[in-house]
Amino acid sequence: MTSKTPFGGDEIRKASRTTAAIQVFSVFLLAILVSVYVDISRRQSDLRDAVRENAMWSVYQFNREAHDLHHRLELMISSGRTDRASLEELSTRYDVVYSRMKILRETKFEQNFLSDPAVIEQVDKIQRLIFNNAPIFDAILAGEEISQASLTSLDYELAILSRETADLLVYTNTTISAERAEGRIELESLQRKSMGLIGLLVLSVVLLIFTLQRQLKGVQAAGVSLEAMADKLTVSYQAAEAGNRAKSQFMATMGHEIRTPLNAILGMVELLELTRLSPESAAHVRTIRRSGEALLDIINEILDYAKIEHGKLELEQRSVDLLTLAETSAEMMRGRATEAGNRIVVDLPYRWRARYVLSDPTRLRQVILNLMSNAVKFTAQGTVTLRLRQFRAHSSLWLRIEVQDSGIGIGEEGKEKLFRPFSQVDASISRKYGGTGLGLTICKEIIDRFGGRIGVDSVTGQGSTFWFEIPVEAAAAPHLEVALQQSKVLADLPKLKILVAEDNKVNQQVILGYLKHLKQTVVMADNGEIALERARAEAFDLILMDMQMPVMDGIEATTRLRASGGASADTPIIALTANASEEDRQRCMDAGMAGFQAKPISIAMLHRLISDVELHPARGQAAEPDAAVATVVPTVPAAAPQATETSPPAAVSVAARTEKLDALAARRQEIADILGPEAFDELMESFFDDAVELLDNLRREMSNGQPDRLDKLLHNLKGSAANVGLADIAEKSQALRQTTPTLKDIEMLSKDIDAAKQSMAA
Amino acid sequence: MKRLKPLLTFLAVVLTAPHALALDAPKGPVILTVRGTLATPNVDGTAQFDLAMLEKLAGRKVVTETPWTEGKTEFSGPLLRAILEAAGAKGKTLLVRAINDYFAEVPMEDATALQTILASRMNGKVMSVRDKGPLFLIYPFDLDPKLYNEKYFSRSVWQIKEIEVKS
């Protein structure tokens, strides 16, 4: 932004100031103009109110009558006709003059000519003249004789009257003319004044238009430049956004890349710990494990943060058992706490307002674990208390969870930094205690998303209390069986060493995740042959054997193991299969397997299997295989393979189908819950990778014309899809097994898988 | 037709009856003469009225201001319309003439459509010539203020002596 806008803000401001000034001036002018017009119109309305007689006309008439009277008398005298009728006629004319005189006195005239002293004097003079001559006319009317001398004297008098009225006419004319001239001058001056005002007003309006135009131009120019700036900003923003996205993508990829080998390291370390080691080596291995776990935590936090920054954090609403949540969370932290010499106390409400609430258990647990792991980290030889409380506020139920420690505490300035990304209380903290400084940021983001609050009360040296409050909704208690299972998940389960023979990568990950969740030690074998080798070399407490495997299948591996008498020759072996026919079952029993487990595996099944092993540790004790099978009741009823395998799709009722879809969704949920969202994502990724490979194989087999292998591949695909809860893909794969699939069918399936992948990524 | 004749005669008599009642001759001094085409003249083809004859006709009282009088003044006298009817006068214009031969043209409508009177009394007193008498044409300013302007002032003739009806 080096270019300066042609019309800057200053220009616009200046123009608008001028505009305002002119506006004020115009209003002022307008006010004056209005007052002038009010004046003019008041004068005019005065005229209208008093419609009056014309003074000039009256005076003229008066003069004419007076002159006429005199003229008649002269005619009478000169003609000598002074008879009665003529005299009476003369008298009438005198009356007319008399009335005219009165009119002059009484009438309201337009022109105020009677205000002039000269005129008044003249009128008075005339009136005296007229009144003085009244007796002679009264005498005429009375019928008296009138002498010639009186007539002569009257003639003289009337001549004066005629002259005087003529003078009055002149005076009146002069007065009225003067008055008219004055009025005109006054009017002209008013007009000039108003013209001047109008001129000024027009000028100011013109100026106003001019400045407004200038202002408008400025605004337009500013608008254009703003638009350009906005465009530039958009481009920059997009570039920044793209960069950020790339960064996030990189972080996700790196996290994934790091986590995979790290998982392997940790797995191996765990196995290593089980072997007999010298105390020195054991200490080293422990260090490796701890470092690995710390590294994993850090990577998980970074990935979580990347996700939050990407706005991908979504909450679900499920029934959560708060009691279980608190207990399992405490349980998970107990190990670490004990290492640091800390005691964990769970403080639950005396009476629950709602033990089951609608919320997101995974995220809730994540926040609790984060706060607790901080508490454990910063406390030595102390107590960490997890406290749950519920209260009502703003007409909704709130859940308050506190994690109180007796650790080092945090100062005032530290508290402010706490919830900011990448910040720790101070640099020495990160040196001493490590950590990314992202944990609390993630917690805050999650709690924000819940619509809640998170905070800390702390005094340096006296420990801290981290707390958060979120609004929750009371939920109905879940099904009793599930609740029992959940509460039992971690309780009283023996720690076994389990060998799993499974070729499908997706299934491997699920089983591995589940077993780890159940705190079991797991060794994974990709096929029967590897499994056989491991089982001969090491003693396992339990072997889970897939029936269909490349190189060596489950039956053969079992038969050989039992025959060979290796380290695990007597270990109970449970068959894992999607094929649940009676014949298969018999084959398993014949081969010496202890039980028979339908796939996909649920956590409840595994729990049961492990519990059973504790009850019947030796092979011989699992003498009632039918009973074992009978006890293995899938928690997800519709996922039972019988329904999927033996019924043709057309026969599956709509209700059953919906139920099955729900069941598979529930399975997906279970996996996500137990493995955690990241592991679940990875699992899905593996599934899709596998699926691509399987589809390629399918295409190849199609072109090779080997339909019997097609079925195997479709079976495999169906198995993994069901395992990860992709109901429709599982169903479609199964449907293709009932028919002879064409290449087009395979492409359709491929498209469906792509679509599923897209919807997962979204 | 023969049978109808008496009826027609009767109708003619009835219809012309008001006109047939000729105006009485004036007994007192004549103060108003109506000239023109008259149905019922009384003296030499004109209709002449004395004060008593005029005051017998239908009239009205007007209380109004005028430019020529001080304050509210009461004028009373016969309606111009009644005088013209009494004379059986027909025409379009009236020339209203004063003693001094001043005259004004008054349209017949002013007599027929308006309650215009020839005032013979002002504040109840007969008007002398010295006081704008004997008759003063007064428009009904009280009924219609719109009449109060110079146009009607110039028709407001005083000292009236004669009305000439022109067709």
Image (cartoon, rainbow, N blue to C red):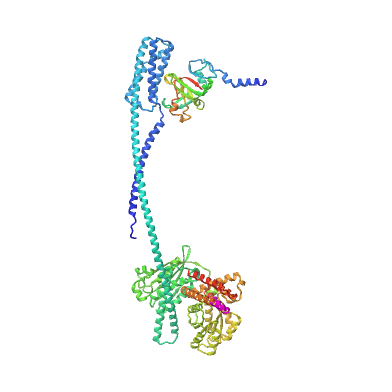
Q: Main secondary structure of the magenta part?
A: helix
A386 or A273, which lies in front? A273
Does any portion of residue A25 appear in the rendered image? Answer: yes
Image location of residue A635, percent across then percent down: 55, 75
A737 or B37, which lies in front? A737
Q: Residue furthest right?
A: B3
Image location of residue A90, percent across then percent down: 41, 14
Q: Please say whether residue B67 is one of the residues in the magenta stretch.
A: no
Image location of residue A211, percent across then percent down: 35, 48
Q: Residue furthest left?
A: A118
Image location of residue A99, percent across then percent down: 40, 20
A384 or A535, which lies in front? A535
Does any portion of residue A371 appear in the rendered image? Answer: no
Quadrant (top left/top right/bottom left/bottom right) for the N terminus of chain A: bottom left
B156 or A448, which lies in front? B156
Q: Quadrant of residue A165?
A: top left
Residues drawn in magenta? A700-720
Give the side of residue A490 with respect to residue A705, left or right. left
Give the side of residue A550 with respect to residue A173, left or right. right
Q: Please say whether residue A709 is one of the residues in the magenta stretch.
A: yes
Give the side of residue B100 with respect to residue A727, left or right. left
Q: Quadrant of residue A36?
A: top left
Q: What is the total number of numbered labels drawn onto the structure image?
A: 0
Query: Is A625 above or below relative to A32?
Result: below
